Amino acid sequence: WLPLWLVDKLLLLLSWMVLGNIEKYGLKRPEMGPMELKSVKGKTPVLDIGAIEKIRSGKIDVVPGIKRFNGNRVELVNGEQLDVDSVVLATGYRSNVPYWLQESEFFA
C-alpha cells in the first residue's frame, strides 16, 4: 500500500494531465489532496467532464458566490449583476461511504 500523501500526489498529477489548469476557468482546487480530503472531512471531489468542456468552450461561466436572486437576475458577492437563463449550484458533495462502511482504516 502507498502512503496517503503519495496517492494524493499521484492523483493530483493525473488530474492535471487529464484536465489541465482548471483554475484559469474559476474552479478552485481544494488545498488537500482527494484522499486526504476524503479521510479528514468525508468529502469527495467530483468534476463532471462534460461540464468542464462546456466551461472551456464558454457555454458555462463560473462565477463567484451568489448573494441573491431577483427574477432572471443574479447578484454576485462581488456586486456584479448578471442576467441568467439558468444556474447550476455546485456547492459540494459529502459522501456517506464512511458511515455505512464503518471501517475508517480504509480511509486513513
Image (cartoon, helix red, strand yellow):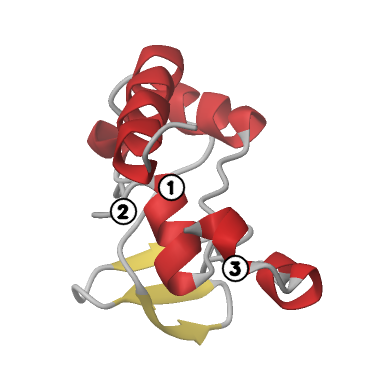
CA distance separating discs 1 and 2: 8 Å
Does dot 1 land on a helix, a strand or a loop?
helix
Residue 23: percent from left, percent from top: 26, 38
Measured along the vertical axis of the image, is residue 33 above or below residue 17?
A: below
What amino acid is labelled 1 in the image? Pro
Residue density around tag 1, few if under 14, some if 14–19, many if 20 or more, within 10 Å: many
Residue density around tag 3, few if under 14, some if 14–19, many if 20 or more, within 10 Å: few
Residue 80: percent from left, percent from top: 24, 69
The image quadrant that residue 37 belongs to is bottom left
Q: Tell me if 99 is positioned left or right of 42 in this view.
A: right
Tag 3 and tag 2, C-beta contact below 8 Å:
no
Q: Tell me if 8 is positioned left or right of 103 in this view.
A: left
Give the labeled residue for mark 3: 104
Residue displayed at 42% across by 32% down: 2
Label 1 vs 3, first from the N-terminus:
1
Residue 49: percent from left, percent from top: 61, 29
Give the labeled residue for mark 2: 30
Does dot 2 land on a helix, a strand or a loop?
loop
Give the labeled residue for mark 1: 34
Q: Nearer the viewer, residue 28 or 105?
A: 105
The residue at the far top in this view is 17
Between circles 1 and 3, the one closer to the viewer is 3
